[in-house]
Amino acid sequence: MTNTTINSLGTTHLDKTFYDRQLLESARTRFVHAKFGQMRPIPRNSGKRVEFRRWNLFDAAEARQALEEGVTPSGQALSQSNVEALVSQYGAYVEVSDLLDMTGYDQVIAESAELLGEQLGTVVEWVTRDAMNAGNNVQRAGGKSSRSALTADDKLTVEEIRKAVRTLKRAKARPFCEEERKPHFVCICSPDATFDLQNDALWQDVAKYSNAEQIYSGEIGRLFGVVFVESTEAKVFRQSVLNKVAAATTNSASFCLKNAPTEAEAAYLSKAGNPLCIGDGSYTIDSFDASNNTVTLAESASLAAGAIIYSEDAGSVDAATKAAMDVHSTLIFGKDAYGVVDVAGSGALQIIIKPHGSAGTQDPLDQRATVGAKVAAYTAAILNDLWILRIEHAVSA
């Protein structure tokens, strides 16, 4: 359940159960990555960590020996591997004026709860998606050895799905086995990715089997025992840095950016050790000063004014512009491949309402109220890296 906090100074009659439910249901509409993981409740009295459990498989060879009549074989001990992850809080709020209080406060609260639920639901999706995409089990379309080697021809194909299924089966990944459904793996992909699969004769659209089986929300079809669920929040690896040198340097480790950095550029440049290409040279970042947009390299360099600065963390780079192609991620995984905090559990998702008059001297004319929402604690983590596979690929224009 969710929690509603209402200041006792308020005079409106708020149905907190209604707003709680509305917040949670609005958040759930955004969940795709977040709904297939092993769920754990918010940790109690355990600091900022949550512990996920993975039962270890038994060795089939231990049971291969034929039983002898009247002889009891040795028993096996259950064992498990634990994965710990740090939880974080997320939240947002909106101010409500006294004029709105007079013209329909309860309606404003309801609409705010819906919008805040969608906002925080998206945040939970992003956190889960990024955790799932941090694994090391990677398959690149066309057999390419690196992300930067991918070209526009390396699209998602039926053959790539077959390879991924083979990889998961070899790793003995557990399929999902819900009632009234055949065992299956789950694939989360973007609409652009499925566009490249749906014209294949082997593709089975959900309309062909939805009457006979219970389906997932967002499910669009299946292939080779893999159920496909679309997400508009599927991961896309985009080039982090594309800028220019502001002024020429001679044998200097520092230089200024010509253009104000984007948020993605600033984040990439702020991480010491990240590789950086400038013109035809390759360098390593030492530091970044956001106050004056100055980059310091680990080594000195002589750079020409206007030289293109770029990162190679996406697809193939255009020879002239140095712009890189976007690379899409399609995830295929088995049951218990990753874990998430259960946001529907007690206290995980909270709506907090502060009516007019609750701010004391900070609001002397009782003009402002606030409606806020908070995810009290959330995280996601891969539990078995071999049971979740990321296919990196291009998509059709």
Image (cartoon, rainbow, N blue to C red):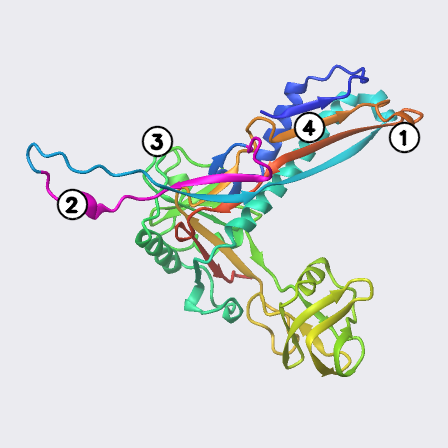
Q: Quadrant of residue 174?
A: top left
Q: Residue tagged by mark 2?
A: 64
User: Which numbered tag is attached to residue 362?
Assistant: 1
Query: Which portion, as a residue range, is magenta?
Result: 42-67
Q: Quadrant of residue 175?
A: top left
Q: Amino acid at mark 2?
A: Arg
Q: Is residue 392 above or below residue 374?
A: below
Mark with earlier residue (3, 4): 3
Q: Is residue 32 visible?
A: no
Residue 139 at what x, y percent from top left? 43, 61
Q: Dots 1 and 2: beta carbons under 8 Å?
A: no
Question: Residue 251 versus residue 350: which sits nearer the camera?
Answer: 251
Q: Dots 3 and 1: beta carbons under 8 Å?
A: no
Q: Residues within 10 Å of mark 3 (few under 14, many from 20)?
A: few
Residue 365 at what x, y percent from top left? 93, 25
Q: Residue tagged by mark 4?
A: 351
Q: Is residue 43 magenta?
A: yes
Residue 6 at what x, y percent from top left? 74, 21
Q: Which quadrant does the N terminus fall into?
A: top right
Q: Residues within 10 Å of mark 2 (few under 14, many from 20)?
A: few
Q: Is residue 185 magenta?
A: no
Q: CA distance from mark 3 to mark 2?
A: 30 Å
